[in-house]
Amino acid sequence: MSAQADDRAGRPPLHAPVDGVERLLDGPVFSRWRGVRRALRLLWWVVSLQASRRIPVALGERKGRRRAREAAARAAARRERLGADARTRLAEFLASGARLTATPGAAPDVSALIVTWNQAHLTLRCLEALLAQRECAIEVVVVDNASTDETAELLSRLDGAVVLRNASNEGFLLASNRGAAVARGRNLLFLNNDAFPLAGAVASAQAALESAPDIGAVGGRLILPSGRLQEAGCILWADGVSTGIAAGLPPDAPEAMTRRDAHYCSGAFLMTPAAVWRELGGFDEVFAPGYYEEADYCMRLRRSGRRVVFEPAVAALHFHLGSEAKAGDALRASEHNRLVFCARHAAVLKAEHPPAAQRQQGGVDGPQAAEAPSAVAGRLDTPAEPDDHSPP
């Protein structure tokens, strides 16, 4: 193709040298001198007759980055306020001598399984939100992974629940399997201790789960402290990376308000029939201490002929990584298990899931479209949702 054709296609003339200069300016030689790099880049754009096209784009990108930083700062401030409010509430609760009471009855509809590892202030808010769900009989099963904060005192104030205590931090997966082994409910609800179900969430999940015999799991809308969606169900791409459908959009966005099948839903709030859970052997311990276990479970459900359903009537606030020991721990550990997940499900991922290249193109088409969830908007590309209770 000629240079003139390159111009018509919207690319700079002599684009091979242009790309070489751009790579040089972005390289290590100029990485320490941002001002010099900007000046040289501007000079190069002028010399190469790119200024009229490049400068508006650069200014727009700079403005976009500034807006993103401002939005992130607002979200962090809101998250800090919510955490501070929860700590205040915990202190008031413990000082008051008040107690929490679960009333599961003789035959619970749902056993809610909560794994804790410190962060007692979040656990209290989770328990209060869960116990406010009055539409069905809920058994509360808490497995504590050797917390060292006020969690023991908090759980001593919890009546009518099953509390199991591990001698060490066994991680989310093993603790969840241990809790499920003693659960009496006909349905199991895996609920992170930093997830706070909104009114009617548990009953709505149960109704959706029992609405058809081929439904093997139900998840819902997860809402971040920023007030935006973390996800409304998820897509799993062929490389094992997860896309949160409608991530970053308002909780009532149209993309998040339609029931649909999903590749998987986060274990922060995931309901499944107890009989099906036991049939499939629960979370596979190859993923211990955690991460990708719920993606693997949902994959096995779908391979057994069952569906994973996103139900918009189910909603929970999710503090998200509220129990992470150190920033970055979750992503590092989940990346390891992503490779395990991809090796285990390589054939299905390749044949039935959209290729990774389409993530950046904003859509799903071709033979995988029938298998993919029907809406992808405001995408958030991350490894499959990490849980928050793995050892540091």
Image: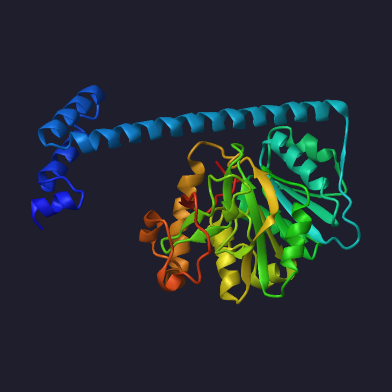
Q: Residue at x 55, y 50 (%)?
A: 386
Q: Residue at x 78, y 60 (%)?
A: 183
Tell me if residue 246 comes above or below residue 375 in the rendering: above
Is residue 268 among the parts visible in the rendering? no
Dividing the picture into quarters, in which one does residue 274 lie? bottom right
Is residue 307 among the parts visible in the rendering? yes
**Nearer-the-camera pick, 155 or 31:** 31
Residue 197's x, y, as percent? 72, 47
Tell me if residue 335 comes above or below residue 80 in the rendering: below
Which quadrant does the C terminus fall into?
A: top right
In this picture, residue 18 sits left or right of residue 267:
left
**Nearer-the-camera pick, 263 or 149:** 263
Please, which residue is most extreme toward the bottom here? 305
Which quadrant does the N terminus fall into?
A: bottom left
Tell me if residue 300 comes above or below residue 191 in the rendering: below
Total tally of numbered discs in the picture: 0
Residue 234's x, y, as percent? 54, 58
Q: Residue at x 67, y 75 (%)?
A: 214
Dividing the picture into quarters, in which one does residue 297 lie? bottom right
Residue 368's x, y, as percent? 45, 70
Q: Residue at x 63, y 48 (%)?
A: 252
